[in-house]
Amino acid sequence: MNTCKQFFLRLLFSFFILISFCTNFYAQQYIPGEIYNGRNNYTEFRPGELPLIFSAPHGGSLEPSEIPDRSYGITVTDMKTIETALAAREAVFNFTGKYPHVIISNLKRTKLDPNREIVEGAQGNQWAEQAWNEYHKFIEIAKDSVTVKFGKGLYIDFHGHGHSIKRLELGYLLSSTDLMLSDEQLNASEYINKSSLKALAAETPASFPDLIRGSKSLGTLLEERDIPAVPSSPQPDPGSGNSYFSGGYSTKRHGSRDSGVISGLQMECHYNGIRDTSGNRKRFAEKLTEILDIYFQEHLGWEGILTALQQKMQAPVQTNFVLEQNYPNPFNSSTSIRFFIPEESYITLKICNILGKEISTLASGNYSRGIYNTIWDATGQASGIYYYQIEVLSGDHEISFTKAKRLNLVK
Ligand SMILES: [Zn+2]
């Protein structure tokens, strides 16, 4: 065997070892597809592999005598929400071949409310406090796994409401009053910073109001599949006087309002047609999966459907600049060019002709971490090959990264 070939095989082998080590580091403790329980099965963790985390805090039915009933706060069970979250898990698995993470409280809400601060949620009982801690620890484990593997992700806290208007209430920590603002008013850092989608707002090419209730928002995607939802394009705000849940403790703690790269929301489901029968839960779960697939493409910057994430899972957290191939290519009038900035940088993105002459500047200035989408309108340009080039300047104004790709204008 020649040296070159030997070297190549050795390299391939060490690469394989490295990959196995990286994936096993997490898998040794929590294997996707298995079920892990906290003390006395009060809490339950079903680890997954996707950048998607579901939780169900209010659907439990266990009433152990060692935990006295909570003496204050809301104690109503969100019926069939564990079943709804598990139906969503199954639908995502059927669609992708991979599991999302699921965290469940099996205790009846009269005994524990993990969607409240521990004082109100566990009311001083040591076993309730332990279950409360285990529940949130499981969510943290899931979040750490997603953060390490993907660098971003989505958390959905499943609930069931009994409000008179039958619609999904999506809680992003924006109040009814906040949502009554115009898109222009809502598009302000004050509202972005108080939202549980704060990290996603920095990631998506969509504006903040679009992310919350635009054409590719969760609410609008649900409405398009005959599931009424607020906020959405048809229902931009709950309407004055109507009950609306804007998100509780878990959405605040585990969404991205205060820190982290995982954005989250509280999904309050009405009963009839969504949670009530196994057939309806399955249909809802399938629609939700389809919607999440679109949502991931639109807002989280992953090109393909959720299936494509299987390949992404082996990749480390993105820390390099990325300049994607323009789309469409070839094109005949305009084309879009996307790029990823891992940390705040001064960048320029220019179009040049084949002789190196600058034709147009598409982007220039300071950009924070995120994925950006620019459009080149080639009206008035001749057919032929052009180049687009990104240049990144480091703090001392030296070029720290540069990359060029060609595009093909055909008229
Ligand atoms: Zn609830």
Image (cartoon, rainbow, N blue to C red):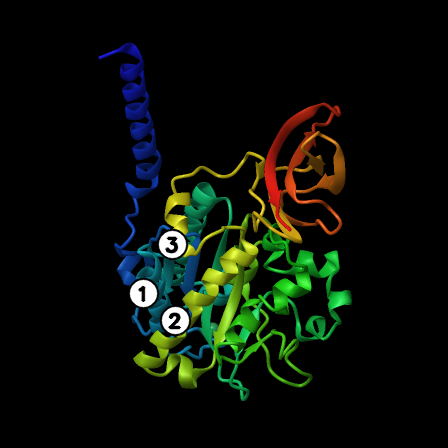
Callout 2 secondary element? helix
Res 384 → quadrant: top right
Q: Mark 3 points at which residue?
A: 307
First in sequence: mark 3 or mark 1? 1
Quarter containing the N terminus: top left
Front residue of 393/363: it is 363
How much space separates mark 2 and mark 1, taking CA atoms? 8 Å
Q: Name the residue under label 1.
A: 90
Horizontal and vertical percent for residue 67? Answer: 35, 68
Front residue of 340/317: it is 340
Q: Are marks 2 and 1 in contact (CB under 8 Å)?
A: yes
Horizontal and vertical percent for residue 181? Answer: 74, 72
* Label 2 lies in ligand 1 vicinity (Cβ under 8 Å): no
Is residue 255 among what the camera can see? no
Horizontal and vertical percent for residue 310? Answer: 37, 48
The residue depicted at 34 percent of the width and 41 percent of the height is: 26
The residue depicted at 27 percent of the width and 15 percent of the height is: 6
Q: Which mark is residue 285?
A: 2
The residue depicted at 34 percent of the width and 29 percent of the height is: 18
